[in-house]
């Protein structure tokens, strides 16, 4: 049978936290490159592995998961700081996020894929940059596969982690984390159970001012999160294993602070100006993410002379949003009012994946399989009592009625794929593959409701549902040459995305399902890359060019349209680390990207609401395994499009220190060391999306968090 050996994820440690570890050979196998365990040096593409210790070191400075990946993975945008990860792309395009191979992306683009798991339960994160169809839709920019901890044979192994974070601005800006896990087993059965709890307080900007909540996509202030993740691995026979995994995750608001609008009851025109943050908030629907996931994976190392992998999964997800203000006519009172409403969106996904991996000859191998999945979606919107809102300045949100928010739908997917590898010489490897994707979309009837300005009555128009389907054929081809310490590759690949059915349909009766079929928007990409590792240096770099003949855009009412205009993204991503004597190291990452859209025959800069910013990081560090210190700088470059929309970049510094003792490991981290005051990239984009249509700019311009200190302790026993 085929055997692959890893030279180790640490060879990619241009983003590594511990230089001495990066110099040692690691036998970590990665699956993100081909869906089967593969040696990193034999993957023709930019693969980045962020190990658990690196995640933990970033966590010790107060960073969350999406912030950690934005800092450590070249090509990935620096992260928003709220609940959403909207616009956190890879190579300027959308990223598909998975947990143990189960996609967290859905046809409905909610951008909450990183509001998904506590970093405590993560063993490592594998990232494949660039367009890919390995796991289906949504990976036009790349794939992020989160691998959770697994059980190990032996006596119970306990792990405890505690930390607290504060900026010392007020008594309500404290964040606390408590996590506990246990792992145990024998030769036949191993198990892991991890429970992590986080309690967030308020956040303050670099000027010491309390940050306004993100009323558009919600944030993590006064948020409580609990993640329970567990698995059991059964050794059924010498070459057969069965792994059963489950997760229950909840992340939701539980505070009493809200935005007070003093002028929402003014006649004849209310105002959202002069708002302030006050106690007294109460709502019948709070922002939250709830997820339940089941995952079963079976492996047979010798089924019909081949490796066989079978996976079955089910995911249920409920996403609730914050009350959002809408203008409502009140002709009987001779004025307009502000009515608040909050949506809740439900997604269920189930599927089966089967894969065979075979050696046809000593130099030729073949991977092939089939994926089957079904996704269902529905959404409603809760409207709140207007007199209660008026009387409380929008702080009290009492339910008045609930209506449909988007059309419900189901998507059934069936795809087959085949991938062939040919080891042409000891150094040269050629590969090519194809994926055929078929999707059936069934959209429910939907009643779209609006207020009549003359009467104030809320009337509805029926928008018929319907069925359609689409197919996509996706190709890839690559060549990789292995010089030993250096590998170079040339790769062509395709990925695709599906326009959001919930926002694409339901706009108007004229946009019927039958006459407006969804189609997969393909992204083609070419990439030339190189990676290198020796005792003193590790590095990886790639130049890429990606293009598509259609783009998805949001209208003023935030509905989705597919525009027949060409789009391209091209750039450079790379990371380099230098290891010195006595445990010192220095390095950094760089991503230069330009996004353009063809308009009337000329290439214009892509709209700043969607285009990625170039970014860079740099660090110096030292460790002797018992002690460590790391100073890190993160920089987002300015961005301006051809319509004079601008996003201002920023620079932050972070410091982390730790000491291993006989009583466990103690750590101290400082995030935003210089207390920089800045607007987040998402905040600047949100102002473009929502203002002035839905309110003044300040209401959506979500600010960056100022300096915070994190004190932590962890122990294994």
Image: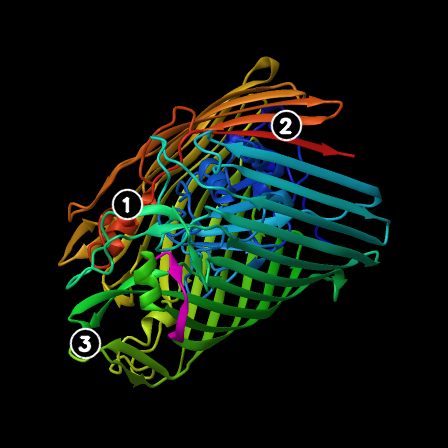
Crowdedness of circle 2 by 10 Å Cα count: few (<14), some, many (20+)?
some
Q: Is residue 9 magenta?
A: no
Asked whether, in this view, residue 354 is left or right of residue 651, the answer is right
Nearest to N terminus: mark 3 or mark 1: 3
Q: Nearer the viewer, mark 2 or mark 3?
A: 3
Q: Quadrant where the N terminus lies?
A: bottom right
Find residue 60 and report its horizontal and vertical position in percent: 56, 32
Label 3 element class: helix
- The quadrant in which residue 12 appears is top right
What separation in Å lies between label 1 and label 2 (alpha carbons)? 39 Å
Nearest to N terminus: mark 1 or mark 2: 2
Q: Nearer the viewer, mark 1 or mark 2?
A: 1
Q: Is residue 399 magenta?
A: yes
Label 1 element class: helix
- The span picked out in magenta is 394-405
Identified at 45% across, 67% down, the residue is: 345
Residue highlighted by disc 3: 332
Identify the mark at residue 684; answer none if there is no mark: 1
Which residue, as the protein is rendered here, is positioned at the far top?
582
- The quadrant in which residue 513 appears is bottom left
Say which of 425 and 512 sits in front.
512
Q: Is residue 153 visible?
A: yes
Asked whether, in this view, residue 547 is left or right of residue 422, the answer is left
What separation in Å lies between label 3 and label 1 (alpha carbons)? 38 Å
Q: Is residue 107 visible?
A: no
What separation in Å lies between label 2 and label 3 (alpha carbons)? 72 Å
Residue highlighted by disc 2: 21
Find residue 199 and report its horizontal and vertical position in percent: 56, 44
């Amino acid at each position: 049978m085929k055997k692959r050996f890893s030279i180790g994820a640490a060879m990619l440690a241009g983003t590594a936290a511990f230089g001495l570890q990066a110099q040692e050979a690691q036998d970590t196998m990665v699956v993100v490159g081909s869906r089967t365990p593969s040696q990193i040096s034999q993957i023709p593409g930019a693969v980045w592995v962020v190990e658990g210790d690196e995640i933990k070191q970033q966590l010790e400075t107060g960073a969350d998961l999406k912030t950690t990946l934005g800092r450590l993975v070249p090509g990935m945008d620096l992260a928003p700081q709220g609940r959403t990860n909207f616009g956190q792309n890879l190579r300027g395009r959308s990223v598909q996020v998975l947990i143990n191979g189960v996609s967290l992306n859905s046809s409905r683009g909610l951008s909450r894929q990183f509001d998904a798991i506590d970093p405590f339960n993560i063993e490592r994160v594998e990232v494949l940059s660039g367009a890919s169809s390995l796991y289906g839709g949504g990976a036009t920019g790349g794939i992020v596969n989160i691998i959770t901890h697994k059980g190990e044979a032996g006596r119970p192994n306990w792990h405890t982690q505690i930390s607290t974070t504060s900026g010392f601005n007020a008594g309500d800006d404290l964040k606390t984390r408590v996590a506990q896990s246990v792992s145990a087993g024998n030769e036949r059965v191993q198990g892991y159970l991890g429970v992590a709890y986080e309690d967030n307080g308020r956040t303050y900007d670099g000027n010491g001012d309390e940050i306004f909540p993100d009323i558009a996509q919600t944030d993590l202030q006064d948020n409580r999160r609990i993640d329970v993740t567990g698995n059991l691995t059964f050794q059924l026979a010498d070459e057969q294993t069965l792994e059963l995994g489950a997760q229950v995750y909840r992340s939701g608001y539980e505070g009493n602070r809200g935005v007070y609008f003093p002028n929402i009851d003014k006649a004849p025109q209310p105002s959202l100006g002069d708002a302030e943050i006050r106690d007294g908030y109460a709502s019948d629907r709070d922002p939250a993410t709830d997820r339940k996931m089941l995952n079963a994976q079976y492996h047979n190392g010798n089924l019909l002379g081949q490796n066989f992998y079978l996976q079955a999964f089910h995911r249920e997800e409920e996403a609730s949003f914050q009350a959002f203000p809408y203008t409502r006519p009140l002709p009987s009172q001779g004025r307009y009012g502000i009515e608040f409403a909050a949506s809740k969106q439900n997604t269920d996904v189930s599927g089966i994946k089967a894969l065979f991996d075979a050696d046809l000859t000593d130099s030729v191998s073949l991977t092939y399989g089939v994926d089957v999945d079904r996704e269902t979606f529905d959404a409603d919107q809760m409207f709140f009592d207007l007199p209660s809102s008026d009387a409380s300045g929008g702080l009290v949100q009492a339910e008045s009625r609930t209506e449909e928010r988007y059309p419900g739908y189901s998507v059934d997917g069936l795809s087959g794929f085949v991938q062939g590898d040919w080891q042409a010489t000891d150094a040269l490897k050629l590969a090519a593959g194809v994926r055929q994707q078929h999707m059936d979309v069934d959209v429910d009837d939907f009643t779209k409701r609006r207020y009549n300005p003359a009467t104030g009555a809320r009337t509805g128009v029926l928008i018929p549902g319907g069925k359609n389907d689409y197919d996509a054929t996706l190709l890839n081809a690559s060549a990789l040459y292995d010089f030993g310490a250096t590998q170079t590759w040339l790769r062509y690949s395709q990925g695709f995305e599906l326009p959001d059915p919930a926002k694409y349909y339901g706009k108007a009766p004229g946009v019927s399902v039958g006459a407006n079929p969804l189609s997969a928007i393909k992204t083609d990409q070419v990439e030339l890359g190189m990676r290198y590792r020796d005792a003193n240096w590790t590095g990886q770099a790639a130049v890429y060019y990606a293009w598509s003949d259609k783009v998805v855009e949001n209208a003023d009412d935030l509905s989705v349209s597919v525009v027949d205009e060409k789009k391209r993204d091209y750039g450079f991503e790379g990371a380099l680390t230098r290891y010195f004597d006595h445990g010192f190291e220095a390095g950094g990452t760089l991503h230069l990207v330009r996004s353009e859209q063809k308009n009337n025959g000329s290439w214009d800069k892509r709209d700043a609401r969607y285009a990625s910013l170039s970014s860079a990081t740099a660090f110096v560090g030292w460790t002797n395994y018992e002690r460590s210190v790391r100073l890190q700088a993160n920089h987002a470059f300015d961005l301006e499009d051809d319509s004079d929309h601008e996003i201002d970049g920023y620079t932050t510094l972070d410091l982390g220190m730790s000491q291993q003792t006989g009583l466990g490991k103690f750590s101290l981290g400082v995030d935003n060391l210089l207390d920089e005051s800045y607007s987040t990239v998402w905040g600047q984009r949100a102002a473009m999306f929502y203002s002035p249509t839905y309110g003044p700019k300040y209401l959506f311009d979500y600010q960056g968090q100022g300096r915070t200190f994190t004190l932590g302790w962890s122990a294994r026993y």
